[in-house]
Amino acid sequence: MNPLRHQRPDQPVLIVGLIAIIAVYFLILVGGTVRATGAGMGCPDWPLCFGQLIP
């Protein structure tokens, strides 16, 4: 019997993984909302917005 086979990942690894999954899901939701509402076109050029640093 291999003792390494039945070990669980450490608690911090599980927490970081869970936070990463939640963050990616949130980013996908926000990106979809921005795309669906057309809010991404509020500033058409980058890195300036309408030629100004602060629009």
Image (tube, rainbow, N blue to C red):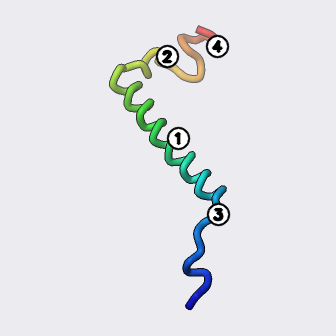
The residue carrying mark 4 is: 53
Task: Tell me how far mark 3 sits from mark 4, CA to CA.
Answer: 45 Å
Amino acid tagged 2? Cys
Q: Nearer the viewer, mark 3 or mark 4?
A: 3
The Cα atoms of the two marked residues, 2 and 4, are separated by 11 Å
Q: Which mark is residue 43?
A: 2
Whichever of labels 2 and 4 marks the residue nearer the N terminus, that label is 2
Q: CA distance from mark 3 to mark 1?
A: 20 Å
Callout 2: helix, strand or loop?
A: loop
SS for callout 4: loop
Q: Earlier in the sequence, mark 3 or mark 4?
A: 3
Give me the C-alpha separation between circle 2 and circle 3: 44 Å
**Residue beneath label 1, please?**
23
> Percent from the top left, x then y, of residue 33?
38, 26
Check disc 1: other Cα within 10 Å, few if <14, some if 14-19, many if 20+: few
| Residue 13 locus on image (x, y percent) | 63, 58
Q: Amino acid at mark 1?
A: Ala
Q: Quadrant of the C terminus?
A: top right
